[in-house]
Structures are given as C-alpha cells and as structure tokens.
Image: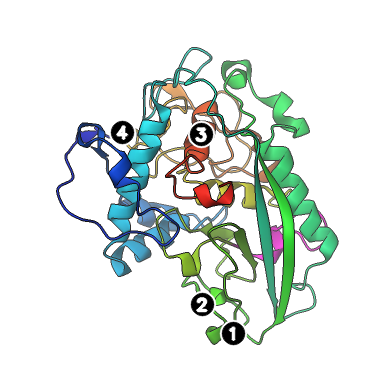
Amino acid sequence: MKKVLIATFVAAFLFWSCDTDNLESQIPQEEQQKVDLGVDPSELDRMAENTEGRQCHSMNVLARQLQENSGMLQRMQNIETHTRNFKKPGGGNGNGGGGNGGGDPDPGPDNLGTITIPVYVHVIYSTSQQNISDNQINSQIAVLNNDFRKSNSDVSQVPSEFSGLAADSEIEFVLAGVTRKSSTTASWGTNDSMKHASNGGVDVISPNTHLNIWVCNIGGGILGYAQFPGGSAATDGVVISPQYFGSQGYVSAPFDEGRTATHEVGHYLNLRHIWGDGRCKQDDFVSDTPSSDGPNYGCPSYPTVNCRSNDMTMNYMDYVDDACMYMFSEGQKTRMRALFANGGARDEMIN
C-alpha cells in the first residue's frame, strides 16, 4: 500500500467544469490528504507486454491527460480528499487484507439512495457489423444494471473468503439515447478523437448529468478505456470497441458478456485496477481489496496467491475474462458513491 502523505494545500487551484470547484472550500485544511495518483511508466511498459488478454488503456490515457493538462492532477487530488472524507467515520483507506473481517468499517448509510445514471451511447461505425443493433445496446445496459446491483447470477461463485464483501453498489443505468454516425475511420486509437464532431466523431452530450459511451473500433486489440473524474468535460466518458460491448449480437469471446463496460464504468466512477497498477505496495485506494503483484488473466483458479494473500481475481477491476469476473467490493462501492455526495465530482447527476 502506498504511504499516504498528509499535506496542507496552500495554493488556489484550477477546477474541473463538472462542479469540482467547491471541493476544496468544504474540506478543513487539517483533513486534506495528498496521495500518489500518478501513473508508473514501468507499469505501462509491463502491461504493454500483454498481447493476448484483456487490454484496458485507461491508465495510458490518464498518463497522457496528466501530461497535457497541468491542472488535472490537482483536481484529482481534490476529488481524492473529498472521497476520503466521505468515508469517515468508516476509517481505513488503501489495500487491506480482504476477507470478511477486513476492509473499511461500515460508514453507515450515505443517504444518497439508489443512484440512476442516464446513458448516451454513440455508435460510430465503418462497417455494418460495427453498427451494432439496439438489442445489443440494450443487452449492455442490462449487464451494467445486473453487475452494479449485484443481481448477476454468477455472483454466487464468489468464494466464501470474499462473499461478505460482494457489494450492491445501488447504482443503476438507464438508456437516454443512441446516436449513430457512419465514418471512414477504420480504427480510432485512444487520443479521444471519436469524441469530437470536428474529427468525424460525436460530441459529448451533457457530461455533467449523463454518462457518454462511444462505441467504435479502437484498434490494436484494445477493448476499451475510460476517463477518470477530474478530466475535461469535453472528453468525459467511456470508449469501447463494438465487439466487446453487450452480451449479444456482434460480440467476441472471451469478452462477450458485457463486462468490459462494467470494468470501464468502474474507472469512470473513480476505481483503479485491483492490483493498484503497480507491485504489491501500490495502492488501489480501497482497503478491502487484497494487494496484488499485477493483473490476472483468463480464468484463474482459486486461490491465486500474490503479496502473501489471495487475489480477488473475480473483481470487475481485474483483467480476467468476462465469465470470471462477478463482484465489486464494499470498499469500491463507497468509493464510487462518494462522487455523488454533495460537492462530489459527479454530484450533478443526482442533484
């Protein structure tokens, strides 16, 4: 677990358009906490060596955005401070030991109720297959609802060690609209060009109050990527290749059960990868997820041991196949819901 450094912020900050401008003023100086939110280049190099398993480029995109946007890291620090204070009096942050007795103590009801996120899906296609059907889109919304509400049938496979931590995040999704756009671009890459009509893509719609998902061929074997809270509103949302979106229609095994969107929306809601994007001491900022040395791929057997503890390989934020991921943890639930609390980075979605 990364050591948490306590610091007093003494400068005025640049603020994100999604109403993060009041975060700092609401937090007493003695409770402001600074943590390492950056990206380890060596970890990106290590992930690049994988050419067969799940490829999520959210951390690569984060590294690029942090270089391009000088104010983004501070905005993320503000969001992290807000998240950690939201957890109180729940206690611990950072990787814990897992198990039914580990992790964050229950901070009690957050009074947010069931959160409903409206979703715009932008289908950008250069072939008829990529112009996915409404049924395929609806299947993805159904998967998101099942996974985030813990109503997925495979949650019963969670081993007893972690069963007490499997969480109903009380977050739901409703389709707000679908846009379709034909394009001559065969693959879009990860530079966010699909998010701008000026580049032949589709502009974001109401990012303060809606989740935007662009479905287009990313290329390079990349399944998807998401923007973390704190980035530009003009590029806020998730990008997924069409063959990994939904659970029916034009889908490709072993990523054909809609879990790529579950994983990427997890990033959009401020979750890091389960191994903390580093080695055993790198933090994912959730204390009930065990430390791990790196991602798991395929369908690993239980127990899979790293860093002297059993990996939570079945967590949606690992890199395993769709059929082998089926839970968020209670700590992850708390982290996601902090975004919607008053002053949170996505509070306009419910206020």
Badge 2 or badge 3: first in the primary sequence? 2
Q: How dense is the environment of label 2, judged by Cα within 10 Å: few (below 14), some, or many (20 and up)?
A: some
Where 232 sits versus 47, above or below? below
**Residue at the disc numbered 1:** 200
Cα separation, mark 2 vs mark 3, equals 30 Å
Where in the figure is residue 134, as x and y percent of width and height? 83, 64
Judge by depth and name the residue closer to the eye, 338 or 216.
Answer: 338
Give the residue type at disc 1.
Gly
**Residue at the disc numbered 2:** 193
Give the residue type at disc 2.
Ser
Badge 1 or badge 2: first in the primary sequence? 2
Badge 3 or badge 1: first in the primary sequence? 1
Where 157 sits versus 102, above or below? below
Q: Is residue 197 left or right of residue 20?
A: right
Give the secondary structure at mark 2.
Answer: helix
**Callout 1 touching callout 2 (CB < 8 Å):** yes
| Image depth: mark 4 or mark 1 in front | 1
Magenta-colored stretch includes residue 47: no
Badge 3 or badge 4: first in the primary sequence? 4
* Numbered tag placed on residue 332 in the rendering: 3
Give the secondary structure at mark 1.
Answer: loop
Judge by depth and name the residue closer to the eye, 236 or 297.
Answer: 236
* Numbered tag placed on residue 271 in the rendering: none
Where in the figure is residue 302, as x and y percent of width and height? 59, 25
Where in the figure is residue 116, as x and y percent of width and height? 66, 45
**Residue at the disc numbered 4:** 281
Cα separation, mark 2 vs mark 4, equals 35 Å
Cα separation, mark 3 vs mark 4, equals 18 Å
Instruction: Specify the segment rendered in magenta.
Output: 239-253
Look at the image and tell me whether residue 37 can be seen: no
**Callout 3 touching callout 4 (CB < 8 Å):** no
